[in-house]
Amino acid sequence: MMDEQDERPDKRAERKSKHAAGDSRQKEQSDNEKKFSPIPQDLDEVLERLKNEVGYGTSFDIVVREMSFGDKRVAFFFMNGLANSLLLSNLINRLTFLNPDHLSGDAFKMFFNEYLPSSQAVKQEDWNKILTSVLSGNTALFIDEEPFAIDIDAKNFPGRGPEEPSIERVVRGSRDGFTETLMTNVSLIRRRLRDPQLRYELVRVGARTQTDICIAYINDLVDKELLEAIKDKIKAVKLDGLPLADKQLEEATVKRGWNPFPNVRYSERPDVVSAHMLEGAVVVLVDTSPSVMILPTTFFDLIQHAEENRQTPFIGTYLRWVRFAGIFASLFLLPLWILFVMHPEYKPSALDFLGPEKTGKLPLVVQFLLAEVGVDLMRMAAVHTPTPLATAMSLVAAILIGDIAVQTGVFINEVILYMAVAAIGMFATPSYELGLANRIVRLLLIIAVSAFKVPGLVIATTAVLILLCTERSFNRPYMWPFIPFDLRALMNIILRPPVLQNRFRPNLLRPQRREKMPKPE
């Protein structure tokens, strides 16, 4: 009896939760039904709604062209500058061939079914959807006394052609890069991956911007759980808009807080993106952005460059090691030098020449902090300076200001030298976001060493390592294959393997098919 009494409250609670879930589903369905708005059959009412809702008659780029074909009044609604005028002209010419004597409401349906491909025109009965479609570049054809509109795909976005990315340049390799037009970027990937399993799913985010977001993956390779997690996070974004495109989407989905290390790898190269997709990664393309997000990513993905795979395995490995050394120097060269200067007893006898002959008018820590700020100022000035003046600005900043600062005693020669080495190592980092994060870590290490000497360096380094080891990118360990340890994958990072020896896809992505190629006989 006691067991039955204990079970009754649980059953009641379960029934209540089911009823609540059912009520929420009904409410959600009713909300979706409210969102549906039928298209008025009266063309005059359509024009009046266009004036009130989208600013027809006020905004000069909103175009409505009224025409008559036979006994039917029609109106073309499109955005000036986003519509393909040539396609619309051909469409109007074809409409003039309709016989007025046999024209009826079904004639337009038959016309579009017979004379236009299905991919170019569809019938739309929802007012809100037709408005969003036109604002995205399509053209709407409203027909008097008809409860629908014809949604015509006649986009013609202004944009530039594919160019070589300014960040991910290579000596050997393709020169095309992503642009701000989504269809161009999709085509660049499709050109390299002629795989029937390649999938492009379109999602719109932003209540006002209605930004097109494309989720791309290879269906028989990608981990379905990872794919669904990414799609759920993107669909759950509730923002007014994404005017800054992919960066705002990253912050809304990853939600990293104040962690400086990037959890997303950006790339503007179609070959790099295609290579990651062949390993089972998911990529996200955002309209109006030339950068593509590769998900998930690791710390070691961010320090690899396409140039390594454009050279022989030996040269690629050498380039990779040089890059690793540059990144290590950008992080630890300045803190270690400050530590050796402040505590010469820790300095090996072979490094006695590292000490400065004079310390200058300012403390060494202050000199390094000022030099860090100076490098950032020069970088920002180079970005904002017109290209013809950028070279002159760099010469003035690097030579004149640096030389005068040394002569006046504000800086010593060693500070300028080691700061330059650290800056070069930072700029050698393939990921711009990781380079900025490493700069923050370097500042933290410099301050920790100056304040707490050896314990400060050890504690700060340990804190950064703990942060990296506990970080996850879409539920994948950020420091893989170091933690958790994977020897095969770690060797593929230390060495650039030959193509025929790189037979397996990384375990991190949990691909449906591990092998890239059959085992050689």
Image (cartoon, rainbow, N blue to C red):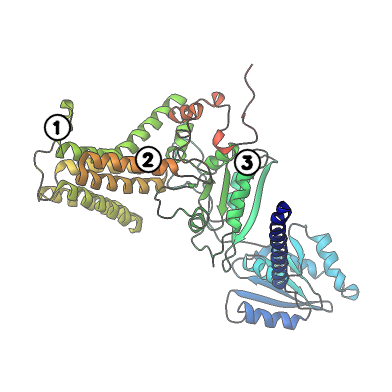
Contact (Cβ within 8 Å) of mark 2 with mark 1: no
Q: Can I make out residue 183 in this image?
A: no
Image side of residue 322 versus residue 505, left or right = left
Residue at numbered disc 1:
345
**Residue at 83% from the left image edge and 66% from the top image edge:** 109
Residue at numbered disc 2:
465
User: Under tag 2, what secondary structure?
Assistant: helix
Q: Can I make out residue 328 in this image?
A: yes
Dot placed on the residue nearer the N-terminal end, 1 or 3: 3
Dot 2 surroundings within 10 Å: few (below 14), some, or many (20 or more)? Answer: few
| Amino acid type of the residue that numbered disc 3 sits on in the rendered structure | Asp
Where's the C terminus, which quadrant? Answer: top right
Name the foreground residue: 78 vs 446: 446
Q: Quadrant of residue 430?
A: top left
| Amino acid type of the residue that numbered disc 1 sits on in the rendered structure | Glu
Q: In which quarter of the image is residue 64?
A: bottom right
Image side of residue 174 versus residue 149, left or right = left
**Residue at 25% from the left image edge and 53% from the top image edge:** 373
User: Under tag 3, what secondary structure?
Assistant: loop
Residue at numbered disc 3:
223
Dot 1 surroundings within 10 Å: few (below 14), some, or many (20 or more)? Answer: few
| Amino acid type of the residue that numbered disc 2 sits on in the rendered structure | Leu
Against 178, residue 245 (above or below) is below
In the rendered image, residue 390, in percent from the top left (x then y), is placed at 31, 54
User: Under tag 1, what secondary structure?
Assistant: helix
